[in-house]
Amino acid sequence: MAGEAVAQAAEAAHHGIDLFPIVALLAAGVIAVPIFRRIGLGSVLGYLAAGLLLGPSGIGLIRDPASVLQLAELGVVMFLFIIGLEMEPSKLWALRKQIFGLGVIQVVSCGLLLTGVGVVLGFSPVVAFIFGMGFVLTSTAIVMQILGERGELASEGGQKMVSILLLEDLAIVPLLAIVALLAPTGEDQSTVTRLIGVAGAIGAILLLIWLGRRVMNPFFAVLASVKVREVMTAAALLVVLGAALLFQVSGLSMAMGAFLAGVLLSTSAFRHQLEADVEPFRGLLLGLFFLAVGMSLDLATVSDNWQIIATCVVLFMAIKAIAIYVIARVLKSDHGEALERAVLMGQGGEFAFVLYTTAVSAGIIDAPSNAIFTATVIISMVVTPFALILMRRVMPKKVVSFDGIERANGLSSRVLIIGFGRFGQIASQPLLAMHHSVSIIDNDTEMIRAAASIGFKVYYGDGTRLDVLRAAGAGTADLILLCTDDKAQTNRIAELVRDQFPLARVMARAYDRQHGIELLRAGVEYQIRETFESAVAFGGEAAEMLGASEEEAHEVIEGVRERDRRRFELQFNGEDWRNLGRLLLSNAEDQARESGITVSEQNAEEAVAQSTPRTSN
């Protein structure tokens, strides 16, 4: 009654566009999320509770949650696009064993177990298979949101969960094909039709890869030259939604299309701009997705079938969590990581709704069963944040001892060194010897204690956090030295310093030549590859041991440095380093004339090529 009165009042209060539900959704999210986060329940649960209140089971302001859910799924699509932007192809390739190893093991094992549970509960084998496999597909949105809020997406455990989620998103494709085969009308579908469908899916993947490699970067370069911000934003949305649409019409997952588009643009110079353009839409639509899930929970269905739903929720979550834990332990994860993965991934997810709806359309399951299955998945999603809170309270926390360690706070030295491993220790010595004021931070407590034992004062602090950089004095430092040994970490710090402390001069340790180029483009003023100078000196000593004089070895070394510097400049400017042969041709000809030798441009280029390392260093 209250819901009808509110709806009638809203209808009478306006004409034209119905803004009341939109305002109500925004208000519910704005009010509920801060409250739930303040009391420690997390933003996801806040959205779910607000959606339940607004939906048919609450005040009834939103009568058709399914229509909202269809739009809100774009939040998941955009979230995976942003995740793809962080997953460079090399990083994704490095995770291949986890994606197709750990992911396949978890999906297959959990699917078999949950299918067996469904049969025990009285469902037919085919229906139990659909029910169980749908529940296997963990909620990408919930897991990613929780990992993102906790800053654990880049951690080892977080990367494993991301890999499994990617495999589960891929699994929806063969599962939908199996549903088509199991459908009563599936016998009428010819083999040719099925092959055409498979070919269309493969064609969509290849087309998107080709567009990502050949078209997208030039496309954004042209738009960037126009210098109209809203056009770049529209282009970013066009790429995300266009990739999602391409995969959708090909029978694939929209989210996977957006993810692949993000991966293809992860090495683009426009990556950060794209992320900044899509992020506001991602946040709003992902919040709307959780609101829609909360609205979709039909309390009448739960009340009428509470016994079977409660049994399914408990058994499915328990069996899936136990299986995940056992798999994680067998594959050498420690107890804490295995338990956290089991609890966080023990629920069903949004792709289950897609699978169940498709099965209803195919005539495999009926509407009442679909309502029970959907309620089971939604309740498992609602329960997950509570389960995490309970796990964290019960499970003993890993205690990191900070005895004798001082956190960075209120530092104001002229030089700030971030990272005090082997490289940072050596780099700091000339500065300290010349009595410059130097502050040093690192996030390894054991290393800090070891440094203290030999007379170095190192403060504890994570340089990837803006608040720590401020506390460490980055805002007043004249010079900041990035001596960390992790490429992603160093890039992140360089970008933060560039954006937040533009007056500071920055020097950085680069892993290799490509990393050096990335750092310069991120605003670093000077970079040095961690092995270059030591390798050059090593080669010079070898030349002297073979009979060269000290002057000859020095001249050769300087030549190597100069050629490397020029090659680096050419690569930084996006040119072919082999053009250096033309730049050196005149010098080579002058030297040749003195020796009576004729030198061609090809000879000069070959000389440069021979002096170029075969590795990326």
Image (cartoon, rainbow, N blue to C red):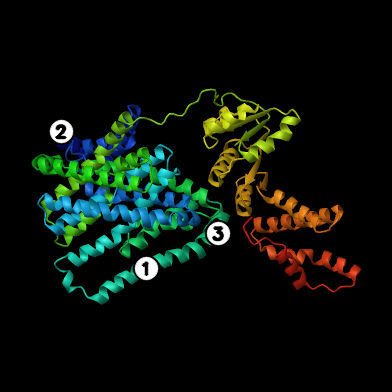
Horizontal and vertical percent position of residue 206: 42, 67
Residue under label 2, please give it: 2
Q: CA distance from mark 3 to mark 1?
A: 29 Å
Sequence-first tag of 3 and 1 = 1
Q: Secondary structure at mark 3?
A: helix
Horizontal and vertical percent position of residue 86: 47, 49
Q: How many marks?
A: 3
Give amino acid for label 2: Ala
Q: CA distance from mark 3 to mark 2?
A: 54 Å
Q: Nearer the viewer, residue 145 or 546?
A: 546
| Image-based side of 422 in relation to 180, left or right | right
Residue under label 3, please give it: 222
Give amino acid for label 1: Ile
Horizontal and vertical percent position of residue 343: 29, 40
Q: Is residue 174 above or below residue 345?
A: below
User: Closer to the observer: label 1 or label 2?
Assistant: 1
Horizontal and vertical percent position of residue 263: 46, 56
| Image-based side of 259 in relation to 422, left or right | left
Q: Secondary structure at mark 1?
A: helix
Give amino acid for label 3: Val
Q: Secondary structure at mark 2?
A: helix
Q: Which mark is residue 202?
A: 1
User: Closer to the observer: label 3 or label 1?
Assistant: 1
The residue drawn where x is 70% and y is 52% is 535
